[in-house]
Image (cartoon, rainbow, N blue to C red):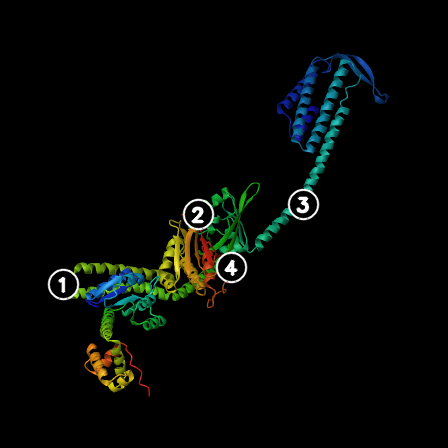
Amino acid sequence: MIVLSIIGFVHFYFEAGRRWLAYAAIAFRLLALLLNFATGVNLNFQDVTGLGRATLWGGVVVAVPVGIPNAWQIFAQIGNLLLVVFVVDASITLWRRGDSVARRRALLVGGSIVLCVVVVASFGALIVAGAVHAPTILTPGFLVVVLAMGYELSWDVIAAAQLTAKLRTSEISLRASEEQFRAVVESVPNAILLVDGQGKVTLTNPQAQALFGYAREEMVGRPVELLIPQWHLSAHETYHQSYAADARPPVMGVARELYALHKDGSEVPVEMVLKPMQTVDASFVLVSLVDVTERRQNERTAARQRDEISHLSRVAMLGELSGSIAHEINQPLMGILSNAQAAQRFLARDDVNLDEVREILVDIVEDDKRAGEVIRRLRALLKKGEVQNRPLDINSVVDDVMRLARNDLMNRDVAVSTELTPDLPPVVGDQIQLQQVLLNLVMNACEAMEAVSGTPQVHIRTRRADGGGVEMSVSDRGGGIPPGDLERIFEPFVTTKEHGIGLGLSICHTIIIAHGGRLWAENIGGGAMFRCTLPLSDHAE
Amino acid sequence: MTSGTPIVFVVDDDASVLRGLKRLLRSAGFTAETFASAPEFLERYDRDVAGCVILDLTMPGFDGLQMQKALADRGSVLPIIFLTGHGDIATSVQAMKGGAVDFLTKPVNDEELLTAVRMAIQRCEALYQAREEIAIIRRRVATLTPREREVLTHLLSGKLNKQIAADLGTVEHTIKVHRARVMQKMQAHTLAALVRLAERAGIDAAPPTEG
């Protein structure tokens, strides 16, 4: 019984020990028990030949049997050996687990058992062999074991009590943090959804209920697809998967336009942040949404106002250029009229030269196209349309502007030189707005040179920008800009001109920034240079 | 000196306008020559031919007003018809002051342009004719002896032979002889005709006799 309980205790308490060793030890012990009854007087003695006396500590005299040792006792000794091996093995396993409690336990309990078994077994063997005259008393030896076990078990009881207390505290704090979480979720201005790994909503807040128009119980447990517009869904699935696979939060600012599906079927523009949450047994995604309807409206209003202002400034600029534009249109009209009237006169004659008339018609068609082209450019600039960003060649912007401003520059006696790098990669932008910027810079350059002696010269250059992209620059010989004003001139209502209202450059700046580019001024020898860079289109290289 | 058909010189930097104008002028029976720039015209035009210039006001480098001045500096009397895309008052005043005969706004109607051209050519021919006449008179004056010239200036101031003789310290008869020679050389039949010729040649009368 003792062996069984030791084995049982060690096995369950240590959670270690080889099963076959345990069974082997038990088997030998049972065999020994059988042999105890089957052979000799008992397993110790084949035959008891007499009684000896043994004096114990304290002078107590007890009778001890004396006889021939039983040879079958070897099975009991093997059983004991197996028991020792089992306990040692289990203790070593426990020791290896490493923490201090386990090591102490292995040393104390395992050690005491081994010590006890070894002492008791060898003591018994010595008695049986007649070397020692003493009764075979097991109790003191096992007392050590029981004490060691008791000590360890009491530790466990204390630890269990502490654990219970701790559990209770952590349950309280868990409940508290749950409360806090709930309070936070309920009170944040964002709409919040907690979505589990199956895509089901597990938690919502009042803001989410308001945003989507559902009651809490209408959302919880329902698939999150309920809240996403149909046209988003195909994209959503891949998005969801890729997000799960690669849990990087979506980058703000480049976020796509997202829409939430309201219960009434309307779509609400939202901004979304996803935060994955991993618990032991499940993964969740915390979805935080902000209704950006108002912000989008404000953005649209701001963009509209910006377009409006830049349109007005274009109209004003074209007003200044009206003479030049009239000339550009009148030239072909003049050609058309004189050619047509010449043809009428030729046709009125008796000897009509049809070849001549044919040539005239070719010229008329050409001139008509030319005038049409000027008007097209003019209309484009005057048009109050949506900004259309598309890949374009910056050199075409320069060409268009030169066509419109050429005559004006001529009248001002300004010599314009261009240095256009051929085959530049396309930039993304609105042709009209970029023309406006260039036109503005060129006209500023002309005005800057009005008060300066020397030949007015404007140089327009396009080339690849140093830091990638394409650069367009306009330089003049107007004496430059005071160094303190180099930055300020792009602010609204700052002007160095006598009659300027100081909006041109600020509009140019706004336009270039909206294009993702940069516009700045530098002083070069004897004049100013305005440089603007524009990013390349995605399609370029 | 001047002879043959008058020529209309067209100066414009726009090739298409040049072709159209040349055709129009030809259809109306004029001979036209075209030039793409002012310097090209100044270098190539035939100074002795009568005609007129149709000149574009705005051209790169050397514009119409500059060319007008360059022509005046060379003593040219070729009438100039300015063409402009957008006439502003200041430029047109300047052009007219510089002797432009017309200032037309593009696109210009054929009749308007052809009328202007006709009038300009007439004016040019008149100017050339007057210039010719003056040259003839001057050639006649050149044949006078110094004494005869002297007598001429005194005749122009309306003096009698006697007074002239007194002024020049000679006798009346000698003056009579000189006077007859002057009238003959100048091809004037009356004193009034002589005065007209002398005026056109720019010969001043002698100052009135003192005392």
Residue type for callout 3:
Thr
Looking at the image, tell me whether mark 2 or mark 4 is earlier in sequence order.
2
Q: Are marks 3 and 4 in contact (CB under 8 Å)?
A: no
Q: CA distance from mark 3 to mark 4?
A: 66 Å
The residues bearing labels 3 and 2 have C-alpha atoms spaced at a distance of: 46 Å
Label 1's element? loop
Q: Give the CA separation, mark 3 to mark 1.
A: 118 Å
Q: Are marks 3 and 4 on the same chain?
A: yes
Check disc 2 and report its element: helix, strand or loop.
helix
**Residue B21 horizontal side relative to residue A8, left or right:** left
Please state, as top left, top right, bottom left or bottom right, where the C terminus of chain B lies in the image. bottom left
Q: In which chain is the residue bearing label 4? A: A
- Tell me, yes or no, whether the two marked residues, 3 and 2, touch with CB atoms within 8 Å: no
Disc number for residue A235: 2
Q: Pinpoint the chain carrying mark 2.
A: A
* Disc sitting over residue A442 in the figure: none
Q: Chain of mark 3?
A: A
Q: Are marks 3 and 1 in contact (CB under 8 Å)?
A: no
Label number found at residue A486: 4
Residue A216 seen by the camera: yes
Nearer to the camera, A354 or B151: B151
- Residue A169: give its label: 3
Read off the residue under disc 1. A351
Circle nearer the N terminus (3, 2):
3
